[in-house]
Image (spheres, rainbow, N blue to C red):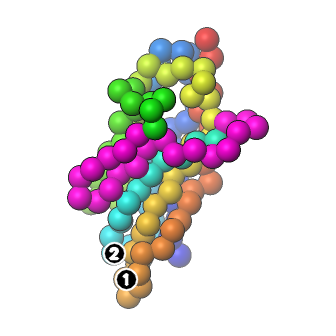
């Protein structure tokens, strides 16, 4: 059973920073594309950043230059460093990824989310 567990959310003043972590557990053989999404109240879930195995990354225009996605495959962990936070970054942040298990193929998994609240 693969699980994605986010941590690191919280309350932060505008201009501050937070670092989110996503720990992937289970009988994992490899991580493929991993991503962070967010969903603000009353809005649809949106892609924030993705890390494509092999080195390329993509970011939403609204976070470019402020957020950085990274991964540590040895620890099966994905990170989202968020700097210069704005009130409009307030949302529940979800980790999503394609995870391969031993003897299987890559499947899509989601975490339960961590709340980030930015106040001015």
Say which quarter of the image contains residue 102: bottom left
Q: Nearer the viewer, residue 93 or 8?
A: 93
Could you tell me how many numbered marks the image carries?
Answer: 2
**Which contiguous range is marked in magenta?**
40-59
Above or below for 66 versus 47: above
| Residue 37 in the image, given as x and y percentages of width and height | 54, 46
* Outermost residue, top side: 120
Q: Residue at x 23, y 52 (%)?
A: 55
| Residue 108 in the image, given as x and y percentages of width and height | 51, 68
Q: Secondary structure at mark 2?
A: strand
Q: Secondary structure at mark 1?
A: loop
Mark 2 or mark 1: whose residue is earlier in sequence: 2
Q: Would you say residue 50 sits in the magenta stretch?
A: yes
Dot 2 and dot 1 residues touching (CB under 8 Å): yes
Above or below for 116 versus 103: above
Quadrant (top left/top right/bottom left/bottom right) for the C terminus = top right
Q: Residue at x 39, y 26 (%)?
A: 66
| Residue 59 in the image, given as x and y percentages of width and height | 40, 40
On the question of residue 20 being in view, the answer is no
Which residue is the site of mark 2?
Answer: 29
* Outermost residue, bottom side: 103
Q: Is residue 10 left or right of residue 101?
A: right
Which residue is the site of mark 1?
Answer: 102
Q: Residues within 10 Å of mark 2 (few under 14, many from 20)?
A: some
């Amino acid at each position: 059973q693969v699980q994605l567990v986010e941590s690191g959310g919280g309350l932060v003043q505008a201009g501050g920073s937070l670092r989110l972590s996503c720990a992937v557990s289970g009988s994992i053989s490899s991580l493929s594309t991993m991503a962070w999404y967010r969903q603000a109240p009353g809005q649809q879930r949106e892609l924030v950043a993705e890390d494509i195995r092999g080195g390329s990354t993509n970011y939403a225009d609204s976070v470019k230059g402020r957020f950085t996605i990274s991964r540590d495959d040895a620890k099966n962990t994905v990170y989202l460093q968020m700097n210069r936070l704005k009130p409009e970054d307030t949302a529940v942040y979800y980790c999503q990824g394609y995870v391969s298990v031993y003897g299987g193929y890559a499947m899509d998994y989601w975490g339960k989310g961590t709340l980030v609240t930015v106040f001015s």
